Amino acid sequence: MAKVRIKAARVPKSKKKVTFKVEIKGELNITAFVASQRVDNFLFTNIGNLLQAGEPDLFVDDGVALWEVPVLYALPDRGSLGKVGHLLVDAQNGDIKLRESTPVEEMKSHAERFYQQATSHAGA
């Protein structure tokens, strides 16, 4: 199940009673499922077939609703080996926000590290 995160407001550093009230109104045109599908399609088309979308979280920043979708590296015989980054998907129009997401080259680098670790342990 998706979680909702809201960009943190300034919270007092000393002990004080704090009350948070959050109200968000609007329609999400893109569901968590559709956001995951868009990320899977992007990954397959642009990076490769060993990366997959994880469970998205809804993230609200400056009034804009975004799905933060973790990108996981998986091997067919071992399953998911870990998170290599994330992609943000606009919850209104489904656009992937590459500038605010983990850079593709960084995800590739993390995936390569997971692969090296997995294959070095396989021969041990």
Image: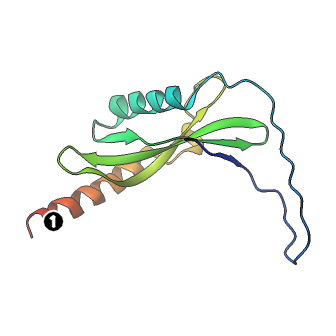
In what quadrant of the picture does the N terminus appear? top right
Q: Point out the residue furthest to the front here.
A: 1
Q: Residues within 10 Å of mark 1 (few under 14, many from 20)?
A: few
Residue 3 at x, y percent in the picture: 62, 45
Is 57 left or right of 119, judged from the image as shown? right
Residue 115 at x, y percent in the picture: 23, 56
Instruction: Tell me what residue is drawn at x 79 percent, y 37 percent.
Output: 63
Q: Amino acid at mark 1?
A: Ser
Instruction: Tell me what residue is drawn at x 42 percent, y 30 percent.
Output: 42
For disc 1, the marked residue is: 120
Quick one: 106 or 68, which is closer to the camera?
A: 68
In the depicted structure, whether residue 9 falls above or below residue 98 = below
Q: Quadrant of residue 101?
A: top right
In the depicted structure, whether residue 2 falls above or below residue 30 = below
In the depicted structure, whether residue 56 falls above or below residue 81 = above
Is 45 left or right of 39, judged from the image as shown? left
Q: Point out the residue furthest to the left here.
A: 123
Instruction: Tell me what residue is drawn at x 33 percent, y 31 percent.
Output: 44
Check disc 1 and report its element: helix, strand or loop.
helix
Q: Quadrant of residue 96?
A: top right
Instruction: Tell me what residue is drawn at x 40 percent, y 32 percent.
Output: 40
Is 58 left or right of 119, judged from the image as shown? right
In what quadrant of the picture does the C terminus appear? bottom left
Residue 68 at x, y percent in the picture: 57, 42
Quick one: 93 or 16, which is closer to the camera?
A: 16
